[in-house]
């Protein structure tokens, strides 16, 4: 392929990702999280086969779109599912696994590329994708549906049975299920609950649970994008979640990673492909190491620490490049990657599912990932242009990172102003209740 063809094939994945992100949430809300995840596995499987056998630009483009649809939809659905099956007090840790898994995939793919980017050996990289997709489809054949989705769309008794199976036979799920209500349960369904369950005796006392709250998810309606936008109760959550998804990209993580290759290549005696693998490995290690922090210190505190660290690192990187301090530049890049893992990496993926109920989380998550893809496109498209323009204007490199410093400052103010703390809150009503009382 020439440069133009390569660019077209590459960009098709982003196009597919945007389509998948916008469609994944509504499908997961209407048909279930499990059905939607299995659908993403099919897209991965077919896309990887076509990429492995690709014999033309058109075929490669179609394959990249299909793979992108699977990736975009999975990035919406998987965080929702994880949040709904994870123990409430450890949702932050479990939620970080989305970002950890993404980093594992990036590192594995870059490592394969390092060894197989020659001749026709590149086809084996996509061949591994077939194996991964097939393994995903097999694994999804044995996991349960989300109990929260079942409680909203099927029956509360079925949801409780599923949650009891996930938590363990002797685990008391009363507190976790108290807000589900029993409007969707018939007496016959209630009888299906295991009488030996620790929650069986307490279950009868939850029949009068209120079903009036929208944000808690005790409505059987599936809400779309326009429903969420028009509803004043959902709008703050949509703005907060979408804003954080944009901040994740606008603070400059992708530009840092792209620029660090050329920056550190002159400093370290290794090639750029290996350097990229090292940076991805650092990102993975830090993300895994920091995964307990959102549960320990809170989502908002981790976001603010991450944004402050990235903004400071961007400022240090700008100054070090302007004044030619290469070692300081290398350290600044590593700190930027590390601070990203503290909050902006994992936290945005779990916020939506904690700020709204199951009936709206699909639409909100799709909107957020759509915003994320747009922000990613803006950074990838305009970063090189702005970087060159500023370098020409001021006669040197590094000036673009002053812009990222400013964007980090704005992102921090946004988090302080519009993003609530969700850690330790039982449902969306509890997240937003205090704010409404202050209003």
Image (cartoon, rainbow, N blue to C red):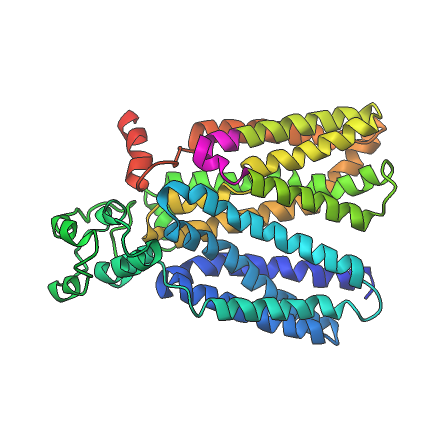
360 to 413, vertically: above or below: below
The chief SS type of the magenta part is helix
The residue lying toward the viewer, choosing from 288 and 283, is 288
**Residues in magenta?**
290-304
Indicate whether residue 292 is drawn in magenta: yes
The location of residue 115, given as percent across then percent down, is: 79, 60
Residue found at x 86% / y 35%: 267
The location of residue 170, given as percent across then percent down, is: 27, 53
The location of residue 14, given as percent across then percent down, is: 62, 57
Specify the quadrant of the image occupied by residue 296. top left
Specify the quadrant of the image occupied by residue 109. bottom right
Residue found at x 45% / y 42%: 92
Residue 75 left/right relative to 284: left
The location of residue 248, given as percent across then percent down, is: 57, 40
The residue lying toward the viewer, choosing from 392 and 398, is 398
The C terminus appears in which quarter of the rendering? top left
The N terminus appears in which quarter of the rendering? bottom right
The residue lying toward the viewer, choosing from 357 and 122, is 122
Residue found at x 41% / y 64%: 143
The residue lying toward the viewer, choosing from 147 and 304, is 147
Residue found at x 63% / y 43%: 285
Number of numbered discs overlaid on the protein picture? 0
223 to 376, vertically: above or below: below
Residue 403 left/right relative to 185: right
Indicate whether residue 42 is drawn in magenta: no
The answer to whether residue 338 is seen in the rendering is: yes
């Amino acid at each position: 392929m020439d440069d133009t063809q390569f660019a077209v094939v590459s960009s098709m994945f982003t196009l597919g990702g945007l389509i998948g992100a916008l469609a994944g949430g509504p499908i997961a809300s209407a048909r279930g999280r499990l059905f939607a995840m299995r659908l993403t596995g099919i897209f991965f499987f077919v896309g990887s086969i076509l990429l492995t056998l690709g014999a033309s630009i058109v075929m490669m483009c179609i394959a990249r779109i299909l793979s992108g649809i699977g990736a975009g939809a999975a990035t919406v659905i998987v965080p929702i599912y994880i949040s709904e099956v994870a123990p409430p007090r450890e949702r932050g840790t479990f939620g970080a696994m989305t970002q950890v898994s993404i980093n594992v995939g990036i590192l594995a793919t870059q490592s394969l590329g390092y060894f197989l980017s020659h001749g026709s050996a590149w086809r084996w990289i996509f061949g591994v994708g077939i194996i991964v997709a097939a393994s995903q489809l097999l694994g999804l054949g044995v996991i349960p549906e989300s109990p929260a989705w079942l409680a909203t769309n099927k029956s509360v008794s079925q949801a409780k049975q599923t949650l009891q199976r996930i938590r363990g036979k002797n685990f008391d799920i009363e507190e976790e299920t108290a807000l589900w209500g029993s409007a969707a349960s018939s007496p016959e369904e209630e009888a299906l609950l295991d009488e030996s369950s620790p929650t069986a005796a307490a279950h009868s006392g939850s029949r009068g649970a209120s079903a009036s709250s929208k944000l808690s998810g005790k409505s059987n309606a599936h809400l779309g994008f326009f429903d969420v936008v028009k509803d004043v109760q959902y709008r703050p959550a949509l703005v907060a979640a979408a804003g954080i998804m944009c901040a994740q990209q606008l603070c400059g993580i992708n530009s840092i990673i792209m620029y660090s290759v050329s920056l550190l290549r002159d400093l370290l005696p290794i090639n750029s492909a290996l350097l990229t693998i090292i940076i991805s490995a650092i990102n993975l290690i830090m993300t895994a190491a920091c995964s307990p922090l959102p549960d320990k210190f809170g989502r908002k505190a981790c976001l603010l620490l991450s944004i402050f660290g990235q903004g400071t690192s961007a400022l240090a990187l700008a100054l070090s490049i302007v004044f030619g301090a290469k070692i300081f530049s290398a350290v600044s890049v590593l700190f930027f990657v590390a601070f990203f893992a503290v909050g902006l990496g994992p936290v945005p993926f779990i916020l939506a599912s904690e700020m709204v109920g199951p009936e709206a989380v699909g639409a909100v998550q799709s909107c957020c990932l759509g915003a994320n893809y747009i922000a990613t496109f803006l950074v990838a498209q305009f970063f090189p242009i702005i970087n060159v323009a500023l370098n020409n204007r001021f006669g040197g490199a590094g000036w673009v990172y002053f812009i990222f410093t400013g964007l980090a400052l704005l992102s921090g103010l946004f988090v302080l102003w519009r993003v609530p703390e969700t850690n330790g809150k039982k449902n969306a009503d509890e997240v937003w209740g205090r704010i409404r009382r202050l209003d």
